[in-house]
Image (cartoon, grey):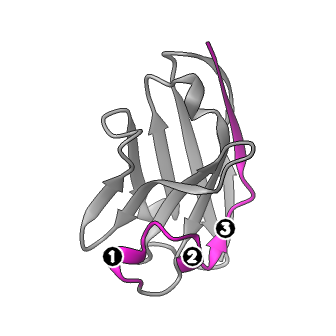
Amino acid sequence: VQLQASGGGLVQAGGFLRLSCAASRGTISTSTVSWFRQAPGKEREVVAVSREEIGTYYDESVKGRFIISRDNAKNTVFLQMNNLKPEDTAIYYCAAAGSPIYYWDIASVRSYKYWGQGTLVTVSS
């Protein structure tokens, strides 16, 4: 499976962006798919997870502002980011597990086999 992330850019605080992650060479319709982000000097962290058994999971820092969704017909996952804050500035990566993972592992980078190339989101104050 190959993942292609897009939609990043420069936006002012309070603005919004919609990230897309298109999969090819395989399907992600039954896979746990997540968005991670990595800010300069920080570790990669999970932002949002889409998983059939539990629906969705969000990190506390984005809960109520970000929405993860998927279009299985298009083999694509989205991340709608609203009310963006300067601290949301990071490179955003989409990832697909590719095989079943335990719920307690959904936030672990090591649980994901397939990664997109990342898309930069910059939020100015």
Residue 12 horizontal/vertical position (percent): 60, 14
Q: Who's the residue at 62% across and 57% down the image?
A: 44
Tell which tag, 3 or 1, sits nearer the viewer: 1
Q: Which residue is mark 2?
A: 112
- Residue 83 in which image quadrant: top left
Q: Mark 3 and 2 residues: CB-CB less than 8 Å, in contact?
A: yes
Give the residue type that dot 3 points to: Trp
Quarter of the image holding residue 104?
Answer: bottom left
Q: Is residue 95 left or right of residue 106?
A: right
In which quadrant of the rendered image does the N terminus lie? bottom right
Rendering coords of residue 93 (x, y %): 64, 55
The residue sitting at 25% across, 74% down in the picture is 53
Q: Would you say 49 lies left or right of 19 here? A: left
Image quadrant where one finds the C terminus: top right
Q: Position of residue 46 (x, y in %)?
A: 50, 56
- Dot 3 surroundings within 10 Å: few (below 14), some, or many (20 or more)? many
**Residue at x 58% of width, y 70% of height:** 109
Check disc 1 and give the amino acid type: Tyr
How far separated are the C-alphas under marks 3 and 1?
19 Å
Residue assigned mark 3: 115
Pointer 1 residue: 103
